[in-house]
Amino acid sequence: MYTLKKSLGQHFLHDEGMCQKVVDSISRRPGMQLLEVGPGAGAISKYLFEWDEVEYRAVELDAEKVAFLRNHFPAAEGKVLEADVLRVPKPFEGKFSIVGNFPYNISSPIVFRILEWEQDVDEVVGMFQKEVAQRIAAGPGSKTYGILSVLTQAFFKVEYLFDVPPGCFVPPPKVMSGVLRFTNIQNPFSIVDKRAFSRLVKSAFGQRRKTLRNALRGVLPPEALAENELMGKRAEQLSVAEFAGLFHQYFQV
């Protein structure tokens, strides 16, 4: 058996119908490379181990869960790495997809990690706390639209697929969960310097109630603050394309 570690934010999916629903959301194709983040006790993994035509790997921080997977699933041998996904090197050469019931306490850092690997990540099917999932999928003008929305949607099409009720987990979390699919859209805004783009977006949303003219003071040149008509708006009113336009005009020349 195994123990659940609260410090790692472990809530294990046990509803078989929901496990199958998550697995069915992956765009399966022969020859694909697939990384599972946080396989835990193998609720989703047991289906993925059976995909002979897929090169599967998993990253799990908890040594006890790694041992459990290796002991209970012979197919796990050589495929489960005991490591922190926030620090592990890119797991594959070339294109790969990602699936996971992401630990709620590090779900946002996992998204930023995915963005670091964006050029090679074809698709992500991830489970998040519903509130976080809604933020990632939100559009301009919404109160939930923010940093995660813009940074993710600059590189991926984001779809909110379905809710996952607390009763599907052991132990049940106190919140609803939601599953998202990210599909790579091939960097349509030609953003090369992601760190600089991230700095612009984070600065814009750092003071949500202020107009960009005030929020971006010290980030953009004075002439931009004075002349650009977007400076009279708040960050939540700008589309991803408008953020990209500002970035190209003043950062990535």
Image (tube, rainbow, N blue to C red):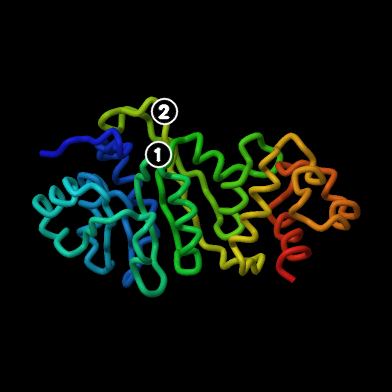
Which residue is the site of mark 1? 104
Q: Residue 217 at x, y = what percent?
A: 78, 48
Q: Quadrant of the N terminus?
A: top left
Q: CA distance from mark 2 to mark 1?
A: 10 Å
Residue 88 falls in image quadrant? bottom left
Secondary structure found at label 2? loop
**Amino acid on which disc 1 is placed:** Tyr
Tell me if 29 is positioned left or right of 189 in this view: left
Tell me if 221 is positioned left or right of 155 in this view: right
**Amino acid on which disc 2 is placed:** Val
Which residue is the site of mark 2? 175
Residue at the spot 29% in from the left edge and 39% down from the top edge: 17
Q: Residue 120 at x, y = what percent?
A: 45, 69
Tell me if 202 is positioned left or right of 7 in this view: right
Secondary structure found at label 1? helix
Q: Residue 174 at x, y = what percent?
A: 38, 25
